Amino acid sequence: MEPNQGQDRGRAAGRLLLVAATHGNERNAPWLLEQWRRRPALLASAGLELELVIGNPTALAANRRYIERDLNRSFAPELLADPGRQELEVQRARELLRQVGPAGERACPVVLDLHSTTSGMGNSLVVYGRRPADLALAAAIQARIGLPVYLHEADPAQTGFLVERWPCGLVIEVGPVAQGLLQASICRQTELAVEAACQSLAAAAAGQLRLPAGLTLHRHIGSLDLPRDDQGQPAAAIHPLRQNRDWWPLRGGEPLFWHADSTAAGFMPSDASREQWPVFINEAAYGEKNIALGLTQRERWPCEASWVEALQNCLCHA
Amino acid sequence: MEPNQGQDRGRAAGRLLLVAATHGNERNAPWLLEQWRRRPALLASAGLELELVIGNPTALAANRRYIERDLNRSFAPELLADPGRQELEVQRARELLRQVGPAGERACPVVLDLHSTTSGMGNSLVVYGRRPADLALAAAIQARIGLPVYLHEADPAQTGFLVERWPCGLVIEVGPVAQGLLQASICRQTELAVEAACQSLAAAAAGQLRLPAGLTLHRHIGSLDLPRDDQGQPAAAIHPLRQNRDWWPLRGGEPLFWHADSTAAGFMPSDASREQWPVFINEAAYGEKNIALGLTQRERWPCEASWVEALQNCLCHA
């Protein structure tokens, strides 16, 4: 292999967009971005050309998730197209698409949106819907470093995610870490996931991506709120047995919520026949959305050759 | 013992003030307070009369540490006396003193201020200065349930703490927990510390408090910031070996900060002859104060009979 072959592959693959601080109080990814900007050799980017962007600089400066509305719920096409909507984050979403969107000034066909969470998700991926290119990239990363995958879909209460506006895009979600906090282990995990993505994309661009037999994913079924009292305040907390136990199965009757008198409320599945797999257990920012945890179904999907083709098409038509 | 003897002791002891949500994004204590309000039997209060107060209700409603300034740095006498200072938190500090201060409408001689932290402090006490009554209460709680004690003193950069305006008062500090989050284990630890304080105060009021031979405490020496780059941004994070390792000794040269290239910066003590004991490592709210950790000296002080007398005087003259 010639020394510059990686570079050539990178150019062929188009630019990879890395977005940090889509939420301004998630401070590990923007710190990493600044380190990579100053010393590009810190990130093993497999020769890809990178576009490093701060999602919500105003919220980052204020150390707040957002200023007027959640930027990562502001990418719904009808919202973007509505000239009456001029909230700071809607304007920023339009600006990001103009600058680094798939048809933007510095066009990027693929995006990684780098997040952190107060829940014990570990190092993980979130896929929005079933786009074959996304599934290819997730399966390739999972094959390299074993990350669990949350498939978010069919959730009318939560729409307008950033990555949905690019032909291919994943969220990298790392936790637990408090908001507003720089934590070395979170940075390292984020970097490992980004590097695995870079390697996978470079392999795809070079026509060398081989997927594993299957992709293990956790498909979104629904969300649960904390039990509430008559004034809408939490009547219970997440049960201690479940705190930081994301990705472990939950069966009907098992303790899920904890009352101040130390009694437990058990899990009552809407579908009694199956175990479900909680994710995003006690994410601080979801309090305002009345979400105490997400519930998923763990599934194993055979990888399809068409997924790789879709990913290659994204990269080559960029 | 007559069934109501605990009650009588409680009346003799005056009221115990419990303040929660002095910082509005520390949500475990205010949740507990509401549970105790509805079902007083949940808290083993040893017969004490309790005054349950939300410190900063406006900040709690906004899920922010404070609105205009840190309430727990707003109790300096010169600030309270300055009619030109009308920030929301300064007004609230005056109101708290008027209502439940030591000479207030519902006078309380003793206060417990209930906090949480993103650092790994576990269940712990903070004492401000060397008032004998505070030391008595801290030693009594430590003898019951072994909590570590941080003696905060001689820190001109941080003044005006709430508990300093009451004749006797401690902070109960529990972590790690993210801001804005309800977490059962944090609630339970807070409750255990409050109950140990109640038992100790009831014993003191009844003339039955016996202190242990000594009090182990961690005396404030100074604070360290993260290394900063030329733009004032963090050039490194807390080293992974030190994250959530509060209360463990740190010696010169040991890894303390972590750079993105995975090199470590070692601890450089100003006093090379001694080990120091870090506390409040990576507390999210201290970022704005440029404090990455506090440094302390671990010391063992013999308990003095005069401490108990001072605590009894607080309680009996209430």
Image (spheres, coloured by chain):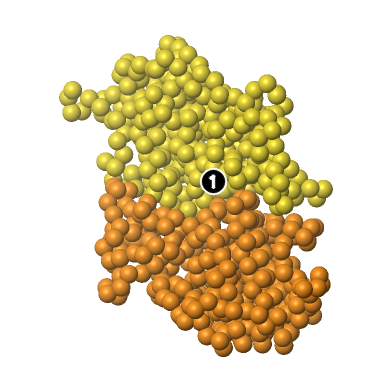
Chain colours: A orange, B yellow
Name the residue nearer the viewer: A58 or B245.
Answer: B245
Quarter-wise, where is residue B241 in the image? top right
Mark 1, secondary structure of its residue? loop
Q: Position of residue A274 (x, y in %)?
A: 30, 73
Is residue A99 visible in this depiction of the protein? no
Name the residue nearer the viewer: A146 or A239.
Answer: A146
Chain holding disc 1? B
In the rendered view of the protein, which quadrant contains the N terminus of chain B?
top left
Name the residue nearer the viewer: A146 or B304.
Answer: A146
Task: Give the amino acid type for the residue marked by disc 1 in the picture.
Answer: Thr
Q: Residue at x 68, y 30 (%)?
A: B252
Q: Position of residue B154 (x, y in %)?
A: 64, 25
Q: Residue at x 47, y 53 (%)?
A: B181
Quarter-wise, where is residue A20 in the image? bottom right
Q: Position of residue A16 (x, y in %)?
A: 71, 74
Report the side of A118 relative to B84 (left or right). Answer: left
Q: Residue at x 35, y 60 (%)?
A: A228
Q: Is residue A87 above or below residue B187?
A: below
